[in-house]
């Protein structure tokens, strides 16, 4: 018997925890945290076991499938790729390039080969009909960075290991281990914060796992975080607590912010936010006077009607109190692969509102349309109508707003091809499914998440297992499709595809490491299987800014103008019940629900409700309840809990495995209900088009 231990990063969420995988005779015999990993130091969460479960899952597809009526038949790779590229080219030839759309799901950013070659494929496709999970996740943060710092990926990261005051809005890092804040073992980091005398304040309508650790949990009314942030800034200005320090030397707009926030007193804001004015004033003073402090917000603030304002105002709060680019505040990484610097050199820093969507007129961001528009772009006839679709590592029927409508729209496409490891709620509509090999069969480097980490590190891992027979990696599938389309595009496209397909992602990574600020080689990383520690985050402004003359733009006009829309809603009467989402420790994406170990135990897809709301409706724990919104309804078991703010109910995302024609044996035994059968594709942040997934108006009744 042969036994060995393989070291790599778990790629199932943003935490990139180091794992040690024991293998004997080609089979996994155990997975534990890598205690020698300099970043995660042995921490893992239950999701790490999902690496083995997905790798061994009998439902995971290994060969291309073609749909023939109601059945599926395996076909060869060449046959599948030829057919896919040919059909896509036919649709573009008949209806125009934009008639073919591309949707990329968030697992793409966990796979550097898929990330790099997804960009190549999009370039060769030459369609403006591009979509991704960005607009149901982090787009507001990226927009704020683009408008304020000059680059959509220059995202500030909380220096949680050195801060004295951590203000968390709409995030639950104890469960997520950070998001746009790669921080494995965050619970231990937060406990160390408190042990050194620091404070944790959590603003959330639900008493989350993170809020349970907080010195001060503030149960805010959904969708009012921007008002709270304006009130905090008003107190800081009114009481002369501004301390921008050296940031003032290269910041434009400090006076504009002072004028903007003047009317937003805590007394004005408190009724709408559902918080006490005194608590708001106290929070502002404590944050401004703490030795080191940082404000951080995530999905709860970015997926609401004023997500862009929230992301902007969090940055403003950090800047006017001198918390940006300083130890213990919001800082920027200097990763070994510095995509920001490389993109900046060639002028690819991002862009916003260079065009409007065909049907509803929503703005583009970074060359993509908001995914909330996808169904209507498929359904609405006319020039530019989407008639064919490629999905890559995404399940938008369960992750996009009004998923039921999107599913109906997908059924009406002329052609669809899915690059996915499962026959799921979305890919069942495809004519062809091209399944890539799974992560353990591919080499791994976290290009994105090292860029968002609370400490500078780097780690590379070779593939643990050989690809099964004729299986192909994501990059080979995307590269193969790109090469076939390039034959119709001209010599430049053909040459680019041929070169990149020959070099492969490993060759590109080797070059990116060499061009990076650390000058690392791939060979060095291969000699360090546990990863290398590159040190704490360090100040880098104004040099790291991508704005003209390297200056901070504190008051972009587009964001200033949107405050008027926020002010209009101050007097609005809140609905009786508002729906928010939640994340679970043993779940991230819908495909993780096909693991027995990650789904066993008590029912987790429950609707959480405050006891007062349950009593008023004659409802009790365990009872199935019907939840209705403008666009749909679901049935879920009720969980009555005082963790919820009155007037707010909560449902986890990623469930809803109730459709016929899918191959998810475990998930279908515990299907749960899809929160995105309730979210409304007509409700978006009107500034940037991000889907509103939190604060959805619903009614709840007994089933």
Image (cartoon, rainbow, N blue to C red):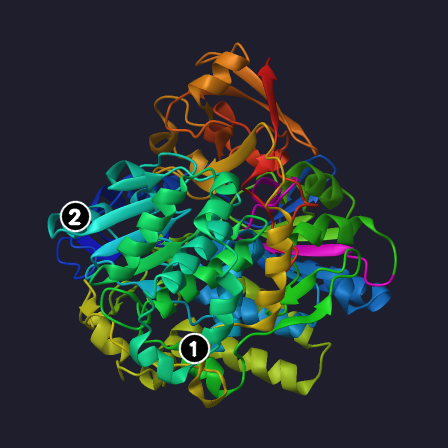
- Region in magenta: 383-402
How crowded pointer 1 is (Cα within 10 Å; few <14, some 14-19, many 20+) is rated as: some
Magenta span contains residue 321: no
Residue at the spot 43% in from the left edge and 14% down from the top edge: 621
User: Is 618 in front, or is 402?
Assistant: 618
Where residue 284 appears, as percent x and y from the top left, is 34, 54
118 displayed left or right of 109: right
* Residue 688 visible in this rendered orientation of the protein: no
User: Is 200 in front, or is 587?
Assistant: 200
Q: Which residue is mark 1?
A: 340
Where residue 334 appears, as percent x and y from the top left, is 31, 76
Residue at the spot 33% in from the left edge and 44% down from the top edge: 202
Q: Which residue is mark 2?
A: 194
Q: Quadrant of the C terminus?
A: top right
Residue at the spot 87% in from the left edge and 53% down from the top edge: 381
Which residue in the rendered view is the most extreme toward the bottom?
A: 549
Rendered view: 643 above or below 114: above
340 displayed left or right of 185: right
Count of residue discs: 2
* Residue 378 visible in this rendered orientation of the protein: yes
- For the residue labelled by badge 1, is the local secondary structure a helix, a strand or a loop? helix
């Amino acid at each position: 018997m042969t036994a060995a231990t393989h070291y790599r990063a778990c790629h199932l969420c943003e935490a990139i925890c180091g794992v040690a995988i024991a293998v004997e005779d080609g089979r996994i015999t155990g997975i534990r945290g890598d205690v020698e990993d300099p970043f995660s130091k042995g921490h893992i969460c239950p999701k790490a076991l999902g690496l083995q479960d997905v790798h061994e899952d009998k439902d995971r597809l290994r060969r291309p499938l073609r749909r023939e009526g109601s059945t599926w038949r395996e076909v060869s790779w060449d046959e599948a790729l030829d057919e896919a590229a040919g059909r896509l080219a036919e649709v573009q030839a008949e209806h125009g390039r934009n008639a073919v759309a591309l949707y990329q799901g968030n697992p793409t950013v966990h796979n550097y080969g898929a990330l790099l070659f997804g960009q190549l494929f999009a370039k060769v496709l030459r369609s403006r009909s591009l979509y991704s999970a960005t607009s149901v996740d982090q787009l507001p943060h990226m927009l704020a960075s683009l408008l304020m710092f000059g680059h959509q990926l220059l995202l500030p990261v909380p220096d949680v290991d050195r801060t004295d005051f951590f203000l968390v809005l709409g995030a639950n890092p104890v469960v997520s281990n950070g998001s746009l804040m790669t921080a494995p073992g965050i619970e231990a980091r937060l406990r160390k914060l408190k042990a050194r005398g620091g404070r944790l304040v959590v603003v959330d309508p639900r008493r989350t796992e993170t809020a349970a650790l907080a010195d001060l949990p503030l149960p805010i009314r959904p969708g009012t975080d921007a008002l709270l942030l304006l009130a905090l800034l008003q107190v800081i200005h009114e009481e002369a607590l501004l301390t921008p320090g050296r940031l003032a030397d290269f910041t434009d707009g400090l006076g504009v912010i002072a004028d903007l926030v003047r009317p937003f007193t805590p007394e004005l804001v408190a009724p709408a936010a559902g918080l006490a004015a005194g608590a708001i004033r106290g929070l502002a003073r404590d944050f401004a006077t703490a030795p080191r402090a940082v404000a951080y917000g995530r999905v709860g603030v970015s997926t609401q009607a004023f997500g862009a304002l929230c992301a902007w105002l969090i940055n403003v709060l950090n800047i006017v109190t001198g918390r940006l680019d300083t130890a213990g505040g919001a800082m920027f990484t200097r990763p070994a692969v510095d995509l920001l610097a490389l993109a900046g050199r060639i002028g690819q820093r991002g862009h916003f509102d260079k065009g409007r969507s065909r049907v509803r007129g929503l703005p583009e961001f970074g060359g993509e349309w908001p995914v909330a528009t996808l169904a209507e772009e498929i359904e609405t006839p006319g020039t530019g109508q989407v008639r064919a679709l490629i999905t890559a590592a995404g399940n938008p029927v369960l992750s996009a707003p009004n998923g039921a409508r999107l599913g109906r729209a997908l059924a009406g496409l002329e052609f669809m091809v899915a690059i996915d490891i499962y026959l799921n709620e979305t890919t069942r509509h495809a004519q062809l499914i091209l399944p890539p090999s799974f992560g353990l069969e591919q080499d791994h480097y976290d290009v994105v998440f090292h860029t968002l980490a609370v400490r500078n590190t780097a780690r590379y891992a070779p593939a643990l297992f050989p690809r099964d027979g004729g299986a192909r990696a994501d990059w080979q599938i995307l590269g193969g499709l790109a090469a076939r389309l390039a034959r119709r595009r001209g010599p430049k496209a053909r040459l680019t595809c041929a070169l990149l397909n020959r070099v492969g992602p490993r060759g590109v990574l080797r070059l990116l490491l060499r061009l990076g600020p650390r000058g690392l080689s791939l060979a060095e990383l291969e000699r360090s299987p546990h990863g290398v520690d590159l040190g704490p985050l360090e100040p880098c402004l104004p040099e790291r800014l991508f704005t003209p003359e390297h200056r901070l733009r504190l008051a972009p006009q587009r964001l200033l103008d949107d405050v008027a829309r926020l002010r209009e809603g101050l007097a609005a009467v809140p609905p009786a019940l508002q729906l928010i989402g939640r994340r679970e420790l043993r779940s991230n994406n819908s495909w993780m629900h096909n693991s027995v170990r990650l789904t066993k135990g008590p029912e987790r897809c429950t609707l959480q409700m405050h006891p007062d709301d349950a009593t008023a409706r004659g409802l009790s724990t365990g009872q199935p309840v019907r939840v209705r919104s403008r666009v749909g309804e679901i049935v879920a078991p009720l969980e009555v809990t005082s963790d919820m703010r009155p007037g707010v109910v909560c449902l986890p995302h990623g469930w809803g495995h109730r459709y016929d024609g899918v191959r998810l044996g475990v998930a279908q035994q515990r299907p749960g209900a899809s929160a995105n059968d309730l979210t409304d594709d007509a409700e978006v942040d009107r500034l940037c088009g991000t889907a509103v997934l939190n604060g959805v108006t619903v009614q709840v009744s007994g089933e």
